[in-house]
Amino acid sequence: MHELPIVENLIRTLDKETEKNHYKKILGIDLVIGELSGVVDECVTMYFEMLSEGHSCENAELKFEHTSAQLKCSKCGHIFPHGRMFACPECGGESRLIKGTGSEFIIKSVRAE
C-alpha cells in the first residue's frame, strides 16, 4: 500500500520533466529499487497503470533494476552485498550495513519523444 504515494510522486516528477524538457510522450522509465525499500514491482506497476491515465507517461513501459544492501566487515573492511548473510565472506568477521544502501527508489532513466 505504501507504493501508492510513491507512484503519485513518480508521476508528478515525470509530469515536471515532460514540461521542462518539452517531451511529447514518455515511452519508458527505468527504476532502481533497493532490496530493503519494501517497494514491490507488481504494486508499482498496478498503481502506475491506474494513475498515469491522462498523463504524458500513460502506457509507458516500466523496467525494474534491483540493488542489494551493502555490508562492510568490521574486521577486514571488505564490502560485499547482503545476500542474506552477515558474516564476511573473506574473513568470517562481523559486518554492518552501510547506511543508505538497499533502500533506494530511483528514476535511473526516462525514454521520451
Image (cartoon, helix red, strand yellow):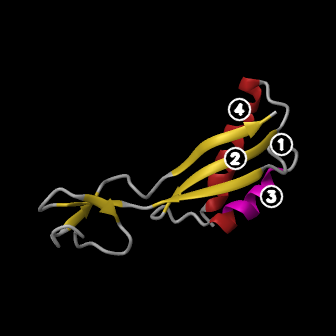
| Residue in the foreground of this view, choosing between 3 and 18 | 18
SS assignment at label 4: helix
The residue tagged 2 is 29
Q: Residue at x 47, y 64 (%)?
A: 35
x, y percentage for residue 66? 53, 60
Q: The disc labelled 2 sits on which kind of residue? A: Ile
Q: The disc labelled 1 sits on which kind of residue? A: His
Looking at the image, do the residues carrying marks 2 and 3 touch, with CB atoms under 8 Å apart?
no
The quarter of the image holding the C terminus is: top right
Using the numbered discs, state the Cα–Cα distance from disc 2 to disc 1 in whole angstroms.
Answer: 14 Å
| Residue in the foreground of this view, choosing between 94 and 4 | 94
What span is in magenta?
44-52
x, y percentage for residue 104? 48, 53
The image's mark for residue 55 is 1
x, y percentage for residue 101? 38, 54
* Mark before the other along the chain sequence, 3 or 4: 4
Label 4 CA crowd tier, 10 Å (few <14, some 14–19, many 20+): few
Using the numbered discs, state the Cα–Cα distance from disc 2 to disc 3 in whole angstroms.
Answer: 13 Å
**Please, which residue is most extreme toward the right here?**
54
The residue tagged 4 is 16
Is 19 on the left-hand or right-hand side of 103? right
Q: The disc labelled 4 sits on which kind of residue? A: Lys
